Amino acid sequence: MLAVAWCLRKFHYYVHGREVTVYTDHKPLESIKKKPLHKAPKCFRSMLTRTQKYNYEMIYKPGKNIPIPHTLSTTPLEETSESSDSIDDIVYSVNTLPIRGICLERIIQHSNGDE
């Protein structure tokens, strides 16, 4: 339920005022959402309250029938002998850090001394 509440808030501009279908592989969650708020478990009440402004339907689907999460959770990563980070990726990451001035200089000094 936390993931549903977070996603509805994150994508507020896309889902507010529209009918949205949420697929879940957690069967009890579907029935909890259908209950009146005062009968829902206490740990879910605040999340259910936050999602009341959205018009969404929660439908249970077994995890193996939801293709993207199922694939991400069961497909093994490819093993490589080389490091996946190229120097360009590392430099780009450092350039986009929100760290400036003396703090950045200290990080560079300590990184240069690290084997």
Image (cartoon, rainbow, N blue to C red):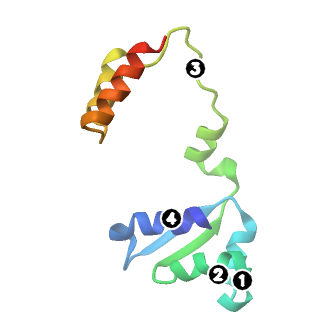
Q: Quadrant of the N terminus?
A: bottom right
Q: Earlier in the sequence, mark 2 or mark 3?
A: 2
Inter-mark Cα distance, 1 to 3: 43 Å
Residue in the picture at 60% in, 39% down: 71
Residue in the picture at 64% in, 81% down: 45
Q: Give the x, y percent position of residue 74.
A: 67, 36
Q: Earlier in the sequence, mark 1 or mark 2?
A: 1
From what the image shows, is residue 47 above or below residue 100?
below
Inter-mark Cα distance, 2 to 3: 41 Å
Q: Secondary structure at mark 2?
A: helix
Inter-mark Cα distance, 4 to 1: 19 Å
Q: Amino acid at mark 3?
A: Glu
Q: Secondary structure at mark 1?
A: loop
Mark number, residue 45: 2
Q: Earlier in the sequence, mark 4 or mark 1?
A: 4
Inter-mark Cα distance, 2 to 4: 14 Å
Mark number, residue 6: 4
Of labels 2 and 3, the one closer to you = 2
Q: Give the x, y percent position of residue 53.
A: 46, 83
Q: Marks 1 and 2: CB-CB under 8 Å?
A: yes
Question: What residue does disc 3 label?
Answer: 78
Give the camera-side residue of 70 and 79.
Answer: 79
Inter-mark Cα distance, 3 to 4: 31 Å
